[in-house]
Image (cartoon, coloured by chain):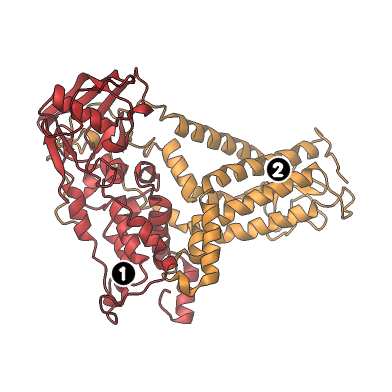
Chain colours: A red, B orange
């Protein structure tokens, strides 16, 4: 899927015509302008109409006052995950943040994601996430089944399917203090999105990673930095898809790591019964 | 794993977090305009109040038994210096050499259970340690290793405390059954204290069973729910409770303190237990 990064032209919602809407008003915006060499918050006063979202206002700014303002966007429907930014200091999607949630007197501050290197204006380099994605070994197909022969019970895939709702907006990665506040942890910590990916695969009923010697529970702890997570739930709070990242992915993954290393009853049970994990 | 994600660190400079040199140049630690501090402040105040109260009561070693009620802080009573409680949880495992409050011997288990609980971890990491104080609010620490090393790696022993919390809840259930007696130990009676105990033990069980470790043990660890329909159903029940874990954590924390305080009021003579029948 391509993602648009616009500077000024071509935005369908960008014209300044309020269309005679009686609900129109002028809002005060502070938008971060600049690049890796420096920048700052610039003040704008811009028209807002009923029913608009913050991305509409950013587009209107491009059309009327700041034609070179860079912003990444695509679907305007909360499904592509492109327009992630920070609005009044909170990681959010520009296209899913209604202007009606703000007071008309409120100054609305829009900045790029603050956990990643800035490219220009509201656009950041999220390449860190793609690198981390490549570090998670893919689904391992079961040897005895050919493509098309996969059969799964719904209750067995429910958990993984919740995680598949992820639109990869990386708001969870942005808000996670492990990397947001500590650049040095980016090497060791995959972040909530990719630990959730490990959980998704470890819970998948047909993933045959264990048969190939790949222990996803072990890699979560030893290679993807699961121990860095202190389950403060910010990833869950900012997820626009409402995925229960902490309760359904990260904590279960931590519990699976406990099974492997710290639980004497599990160890004893496995010794006595001599059987692999069900 | 480390392939191409080496941090952008300049030699000799501080890592800097949100003020890192590659990120948008914003000097403020955060730009939140809401009252983000309210939740961690309220959490810290609530937990601090409980710690003060429970410390006082645990060391008091007095006013914890008024027939037929025994304070949940002192149950089971496993030292010889406990007050005698007829048919009550008097098990003198520690004999006479223990001279301190007997509450200290048993409180370590519920304390450990709550201290390592996934909800309370979030609460005190945010409220007391500011790690982070709130979402997208920069934490004040220069370095962070999370739960990867001692002492916080010990949070992984939550499972052990869950195993210990179940029999403790069982004993408190026994105490609640004993509360259906009167002062002369005759069965078939109840007072306001009985109601307090029933509410308390219900919340204690709900909190204990809603634990993430419990959810994992009953079914979460399975790869194929369809092969274990009973455990799958149990996992869903526990999952329903687990969705209310924070609420149950606070409700049971308050109820256990109130149950203890109720016994204190009766035992110290400040209040007479109203009897229903």
Q: Is residue A136 visible?
A: yes
As rendered, which of A114 and A13 lies closer to the eye?
Answer: A13
The chain letter under disc 1 is A
Residue B252 sits above or below residue A118 on the image: below
Residue A86 sits above or below residue B244 on the image: above
Counting from the top left corner in percent of width and height, residue B125 is at: 42, 41
Left or right of A169: which side holds B201? right
Left or right of B277: which side holds B62? left
Left or right of A2: which side holds B222? right
Residue at 33%, 35% (x, y): give it.
Answer: B139
**Residues packed near mark 1 inside 10 Å, few (<14), some (14 to 19) or many (20 plus):** few
Q: Which residue is mark 2?
A: B259
Disc 1 secondary structure class: loop
Counting from the top left corner in percent of width and height, residue B203 is at: 64, 49
As rendered, which of B105 and B207 lies closer to the eye?
Answer: B207
Q: CA distance from mark 1 to mark 2?
A: 47 Å
Q: Same subunit under labels 1 and 2? A: no
Query: Residue B164 sits in which quadrant?
Result: bottom right
Counting from the top left corner in percent of width and height, residue B82 is at: 75, 51
Q: Which residue is mark 1?
A: A215
As rendered, which of B239 and A277 lies closer to the eye?
Answer: B239
Disc 2 secondary structure class: helix
Q: Which mark is residue A70?
A: none
Q: Cβ–Cβ below 8 Å for labels 1 and 2? A: no
The chain letter under disc 2 is B
Query: Residue B49 sits in which quadrant?
Result: top right
Q: Is residue B161 visible?
A: no
The N terminus of chain B lies in quadrant? bottom left
Residue at 40%, 48% (x, y): give it.
Answer: A231
């Amino acid at each position: 899927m391509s993602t648009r990064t616009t500077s000024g032209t071509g935005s369908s919602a960008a014209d300044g015509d309020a269309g005679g809407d009686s609900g129109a008003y002028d809002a005060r915006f502070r938008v971060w302008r600049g690049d890796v060499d420096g920048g700052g918050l610039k003040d704008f006063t811009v028209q807002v109409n009923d029913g608009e979202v913050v991305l509409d206002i950013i587009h209107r700014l491009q059309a009327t006052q700041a034609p070179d303002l860079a912003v990444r966007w695509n679907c305007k429907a909360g499904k592509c995950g492109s327009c992630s930014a920070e609005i009044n200091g909170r990681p959010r999607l520009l296209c899913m943040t209604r202007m009606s949630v703000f007071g008309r007197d409120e100054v609305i501050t829009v900045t790029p994601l603050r956990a990643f290197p800035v490219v220009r204006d509201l656009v950041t380099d999220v390449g860190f996430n793609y690198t981390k994605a490549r570090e998670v070994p893919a689904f391992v197909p079961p040897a005895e089944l050919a493509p098309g022969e996969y059969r799964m019970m719904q209750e067995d895939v429910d958990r993984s399917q919740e995680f598949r709702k992820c639109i990869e907006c990386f708001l969870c990665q942005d808000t996670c203090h492990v990397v947001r506040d500590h650049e040095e942890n980016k090497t060791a910590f995959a972040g909530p999105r990719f630990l959730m990916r490990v959980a998704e695969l470890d819970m998948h009923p047909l993933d045959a990673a264990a048969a190939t010697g790949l222990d996803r529970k072990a890699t979560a702890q030893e290679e993807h930095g699961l121990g860095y997570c202190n389950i403060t739930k910010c990833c869950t709070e900012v997820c626009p898809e409402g995925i229960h990242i902490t309760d359904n992915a990260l904590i279960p993954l931590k519990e699976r790591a406990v099974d492997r290393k710290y639980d004497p009853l599990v160890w004893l049970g496995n010794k006595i019964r001599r059987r692999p994990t069900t | 794993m480390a392939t191409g994600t080496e941090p952008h660190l300049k030699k000799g400079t501080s890592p800097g977090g949100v003020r890192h040199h590659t990120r948008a140049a914003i000097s403020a630690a955060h730009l939140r305009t809401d009252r983000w501090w309210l939740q961690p402040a309220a959490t810290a105040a609530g937990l601090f109040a409980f710690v003060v109260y429970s410390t006082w009561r645990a060391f008091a070693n007095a006013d914890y038994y008024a027939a037929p009620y025994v304070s949940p802080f002192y149950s089971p009573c496993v030292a010889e210096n406990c007050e005698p409680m007829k048919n009550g949880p008097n098990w003198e495992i520690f004999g006479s050499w223990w001279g301190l409050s007997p509450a200290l011997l048993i409180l370590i288990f519920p304390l450990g259970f709550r201290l390592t609980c996934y909800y309370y971890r979030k609460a005190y990491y945010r409220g007391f340690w500011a790690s982070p104080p709130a979402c997208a609010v920069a934490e004040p620490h220069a370095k962070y290793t999370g739960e990867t090393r001692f002492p916080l790696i010990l949070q992984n022993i939550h499972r052990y405390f869950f195993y210990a919390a179940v029999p403790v809840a069982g004993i408190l259930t026994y105490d609640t059954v004993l509360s259906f007696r009167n002062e002369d130990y005759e069965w078939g009676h109840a007072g306001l204290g009985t109601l307090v105990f029933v509410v308390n033990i219900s919340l204690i069980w709900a909190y204990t069973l809603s634990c993430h470790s419990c959810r994992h043990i009953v079914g979460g660890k399975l790869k194929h729910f369809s092969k274990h329909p009973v455990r799958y159903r149990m996992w869903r029940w526990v999952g329903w409770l687990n969705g209310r874990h924070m609420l149950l954590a606070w409700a049971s924390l308050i109820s256990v303190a109130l149950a203890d305080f109720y016994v204190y009021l009766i035992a110290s003579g400040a209040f007479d237990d109203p009897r229903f029948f």
